[in-house]
Structures are given as structure tokens and as C-alpha cells.
Amino acid sequence: MRQEDAVSEPIVTVTPTIMSGVVVRWFTSLGAADHCEPVLSASRERVMFHGRATADTVPAEWQEAAEKAHKALAAQRYSYWAPTPESVTALATHETQLFGPPVPIRNPEEQS
């Protein structure tokens, strides 16, 4: 796990993929997110720990959110054209870019 740019709250991205549909990923730092090194992810298939992360090293709140995201995504497994559930998209703290680090998502109230 990358520790530079460590954050107190997770960096979470919600990304559409070809093979797994939407994937939600939890990162411990902006550097880890920039290099796509999550500690936890959730898709319609499963919840997975990555790298050296385990149930003992990832906060329980992150694991609970991942389980809820997995269940929401699995519930619409065969609805390919259905929009991503709001409960899943609301988890995102950052948007991914093709090049460069993820960009923070601003709340509508902050954009005035």
C-alpha cells in the first residue's frame, strides 16, 4: 500500500468496466489511487481485498460499504442498461481520469 499523500478518509472511485460492470474501489492515498492500487473493491461479482490488505487491516466501515455496494450491483446483474444505483454512485469521492490522478468530486453546494 502506498502511504504518501495518506488520507484520513478513503478515496473512493466508481468506474464502469467492460468485464465486471461497475467497480467501486477504496484507496488509502491519492498516490495509490493514481497508480490504481486499491485495498478493497466491490463489483456485481464479489468484494475483494487487494495487495496485502485483509479484513483485519481494512476499516470495518469500508468493508460494510463494499458489501452494500456489491449487493446493489448484483441485484441488477442482468439489467445491462440500468443506471448505476444511487447508493453506489454516492460512495464516490473522486472521479477517475484517463491521464493523471483522480479528481475530487465537488458537492453541488460548493460549486456556487
Image (cartoon, grey):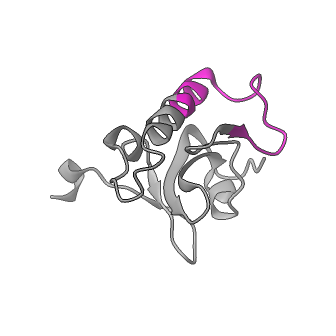
Q: Please indicate whether residue 16 sits to the left or right of residue 56 in the image.
A: left
Per the image, is 59 magenta?
Answer: yes
Q: Please indicate whether residue 41 sits to the left or right of residue 74 in the image.
A: right
Residue 43 image offset from top left, x and y in percent: 57, 45
Residue at point 48% right, 46% down?
A: 77
Residue 85 image offset from top left, x and y in percent: 35, 44
Q: Quadrant of the C terminus?
A: bottom left
Residues rendered magenta in the picture = 48-67
Residue at point 27% right, 50% down?
A: 107
Seen from the viewer's position, the closer of residues 72 and 5 is 72
Residue at point 50% right, 61% down?
A: 16
The total number of labels drawn is: 0
Per the image, is 105 magenta?
Answer: no
Residue 17 image offset from top left, x and y in percent: 55, 63
Residue 80, picture quadrant: bottom left
Residue 63, picture quadrant: top right
Kindly give the residue lying farthest to the left in the view shown.
112
Seen from the viewer's position, the closer of residues 92 and 43 is 43
